């Protein structure tokens, strides 16, 4: 193990609960609040398992929610000294199901009607197919997909009320996809669960390869993953180490719910460890976020800022969003003048339209701003392109071999690559990347050069494994072309890392991030929670979203609201404050020392 690993291990050995999680030898759920060092514990745990408990050729599978989380996780493991090892899977649940269950086993069990060769439906085609049906009550695809995700029978006793109209359509749409010989991300996971549930050979093969399965952000992963884990616990000797926080479950629209993590943590055969220390924020912020949650969790500020006198402030505007944006700019300037770097200030808003409006206002006021979420997604291809950009900028920052092997895996979906082909391919990639340095100051030209030489568009056009990559690549290209100031490849190498820029993002996308100062505009009733958060379940989720938003802050949290707002037709309405604003004000008033 390297010196960095030793340093981190030393750090967690001073926290009893973190250390207990690190040492766990049985099924374990770690309930980890914001800033509790969960990624630190999880990455150290993976290193420990591989070094001390799992011997080659066996390995482990580590499942996370998004490709972004996978990337962050991998880079932390490399820093801790993880070396390439066979049978160590780090990826999303979907990629695990596709590469470890569907691809090796689907052909053995035709009764599951998994279309072969595997054909994944593109988002555009899925929308077209859905819209071609006239489902009763005209449900939205997003609601139908949510019902499809939850409509999986099995071991879990969690009962979540379904939306009947969407559920009916969900059953028909699922059949329609199969009839058309398509898989989508939902059916991929559901079919995998069926295979694991019913086929002992599939379970045995998984058990042989993966004695441990590690799951990050369990609360975000929904019912199919939950059923998969429960089945493995009931029917195999695979051990499970899961980390999550039910209070940070904010993806109900995708079928996630806090209940699954809670159910897992209550099993007799699973030990539950609570991480109570918060290494991020001051105690004021920790207490304020818990107050919004309306549940005391007993989190204790334990980092450098534990005694910091944090600011919790409330700004009222008499007019609409334009005035709120003006106040936001004032606050950014104020904190910047006080010495807080721009990248340590974040503005968390309700939707992407507000992100765009605010970015325009920042540009008018000469405040450098960074939009945390781009129009393109960080898919496998975009991460590959990003790695190429990194290699062009600094040859030691990424492995050239990995760039080549990933490209090989992309194109081998369409044709067999011999050893000679691979040698030539490596040479082409090497020559292309080396020569592409001349375009590094113009991202769109660099992308076009890369495509011309390596053949990105031709490799992914009509791809049955990667049906959405071309669309996504085009969005990246559009971004490269449409920026006011010319983007360089640095935009890609530093994606997700603001450079002395204020971070603008939605509250939902702020999960996992942290800043000295968090500014929260839009704190009116019916804005946050939204007018549509009209059931107890939806309200509870909005409350958790506020908990996530406030707990991003280390030193200050500034809330802004309008007393009057204009609707889309230009009519003004008076607005009451959000219940979360009211709660936080109540919290502040109750603190005698404030
Ligand atoms: N035992 C510890 N002692 C001191 N610092 C710690 C300890 N554990 C974690 N940290 C520090 O706390 C910070 C947050 O850790 P980490 O990123 O692992 O938290 P997290 O729980 O994954 O955060 P998130 O809320 O984003 O999920 C890091 O800077 C980490 O080094």
Image (cartoon, helix red, strand yellow):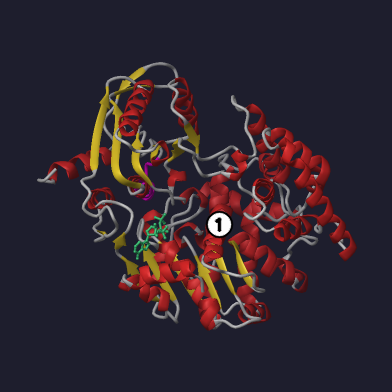
Q: Is residue 567 left or right of residue 425?
A: left
Give the x, y percent position of residue 290. Answer: 26, 52
Specify the principal SS of the magenta part.
helix
Q: What residue lies at 39% left-to-right and 60% top-to-bottom? A: 245
Where 221 sits versus 206, above or below?
A: above
Give the x, y percent position of residue 551. Answer: 33, 49
In magenta stretch: residue 534: yes
Where 331 sits versus 193, above or below?
A: above
Q: Is residue 238 left or right of residue 122?
A: left
Q: What residue lies at 45% left-to-right and 78% top-to-bottom? A: 27
Give the x, y percent position of residue 238. Answer: 54, 79
- Residue 260 visible, this orientation: no
Give the x, y percent position of residue 202. Answer: 67, 77
The quadrant in which the C terminus is found is top left
In magenta stretch: residue 522: no
Find ligand 1 in the image and state its quadrant: bottom left
228 or 346: nearer the eye?
346
Q: What residue lies at 36% left-to-right and 47% top-to-bottom? A: 552
Q: How many marks?
A: 1
| SS of the residue under disc 1 | helix
Residue at the far top: name it.
570
Where 395 sits versus 8, above or below?
A: above
Q: What stretch is highlighted in magenta?
A: 533-542
Which of the 4 image quarters holds residue 105? bottom right
- Residue 19 visible, this orientation: yes
Q: Mark 1 points at which residue?
A: 149
Q: Is residue 414 left or right of residue 109?
A: right
Which of the 4 image quarters holds residue 530? top left
């Amino acid at each position: 193990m390297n010196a960095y690993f030793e340093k981190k291990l030393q750090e967690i050995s001073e926290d009893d609960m973190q250390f207990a999680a690190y040492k766990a030898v049985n099924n374990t759920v770690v309930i980890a609040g914001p800033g509790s060092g969960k990624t630190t514990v999880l990455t150290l745990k993976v290193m420990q398992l591989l070094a001390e408990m799992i011997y080659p050729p066996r390995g482990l599978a580590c499942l996370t929610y998004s490709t972004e989380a996978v990337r962050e996780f991998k880079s932390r493991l490399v820093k801790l000294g993880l070396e390439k090892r066979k049978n160590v899977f780090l990826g999303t649940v979907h990629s695990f199901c596709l590469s470890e269950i569907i691809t090796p086993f689907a052909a053995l069990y035709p009764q599951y009607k998994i279309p072969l060769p595997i054909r994944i439906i593109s988002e555009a085609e899925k929308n077209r197919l859905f819209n071609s049906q006239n489902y009763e009550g005209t449900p939205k695809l997003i609601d139908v997909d949510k019902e499809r995700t939850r409509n999986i029978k099995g071991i879990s006793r969690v009962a979540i009320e379904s939306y009947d109209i969407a559920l009916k359509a969900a059953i028909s749409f699922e059949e329609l996809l199969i009839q058309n010989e398509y898989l989508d991300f939902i059916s991929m996971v559901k079919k995998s669960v069926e295979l694991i549930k019913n086929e002992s050979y599939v379970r045995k093969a998984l058990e042989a390869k993966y004695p441990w399965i590690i799951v990050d952000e369990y609360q975000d992963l929904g019912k199919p993953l939950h059923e998969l884990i429960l089945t493995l616990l009931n029917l195999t000797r695979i051990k499970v180490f899961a980390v999550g926080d039910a209070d940070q479950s904010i993806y109900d629209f995708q079928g996630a719910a806090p209940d699954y993590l809670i159910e897992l943590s209550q099993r007799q055969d699973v030990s539950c460890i609570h991480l109570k220390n918060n290494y991020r924020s001051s105690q004021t912020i920790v207490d304020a976020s818990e107050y919004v949650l309306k549940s005391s969790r007993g989190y204790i500020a334990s980092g450098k800022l534990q005694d910091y006198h944090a600011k919790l402030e409330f700004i009222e505007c008499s007019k609409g969003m334009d005035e709120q944006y003006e106040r936001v700019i004032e606050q950014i300037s104020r904190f910047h003048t006080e010495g807080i770097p721009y990248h340590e200030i974040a503005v968390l808003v309700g939707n992407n339209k507000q992100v765009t409006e605010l970015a325009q206002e920042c540009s008018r006021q000469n405040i450098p701003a960074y939009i945390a979420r781009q129009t393109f997604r960080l898919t496998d291809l975009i991460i590959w392109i990003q790695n190429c950009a990194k290699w062009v900028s600094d040859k030691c920052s990424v492995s050239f071999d990995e760039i080549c092997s990933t490209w090989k895996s992309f194109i081998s979906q369409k044709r067999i690559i011999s050893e000679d082909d691979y040698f030539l391919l490596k040479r082409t990639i090497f020559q292309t990347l080396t020569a592409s340095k001349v375009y590094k100051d113009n991202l769109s030209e660099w992308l076009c050069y890369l495509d011309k030489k390596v053949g990105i568009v031709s490799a992914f056009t009509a791809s049955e494994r990667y049906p959405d990559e071309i669309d996504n690549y085009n969005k990246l290209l559009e971004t490269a072309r449409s920026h006011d100031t010319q983007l360089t490849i640095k935009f890609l190498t530093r994606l997700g890392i603001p450079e002395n820029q204020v971070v603008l993002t939605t509250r939902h996308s702020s999960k996992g991030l942290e800043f000295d100062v968090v500014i929260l505009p839009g704190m009116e009733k019916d804005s946050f929670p939204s007018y549509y958060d009209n059931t107890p379940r939806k309200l509870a989720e909005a409350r958790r979203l506020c908990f996530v938003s406030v707990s991003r802050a280390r030193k200050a949290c500034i809330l802004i609201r309008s007393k009057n707002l204009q609707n889309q037709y230009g009519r003004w309405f008076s607005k009451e404050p959000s219940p979360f604003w009211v709660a936080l004000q109540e919290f502040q008033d109750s603190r005698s020392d404030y």
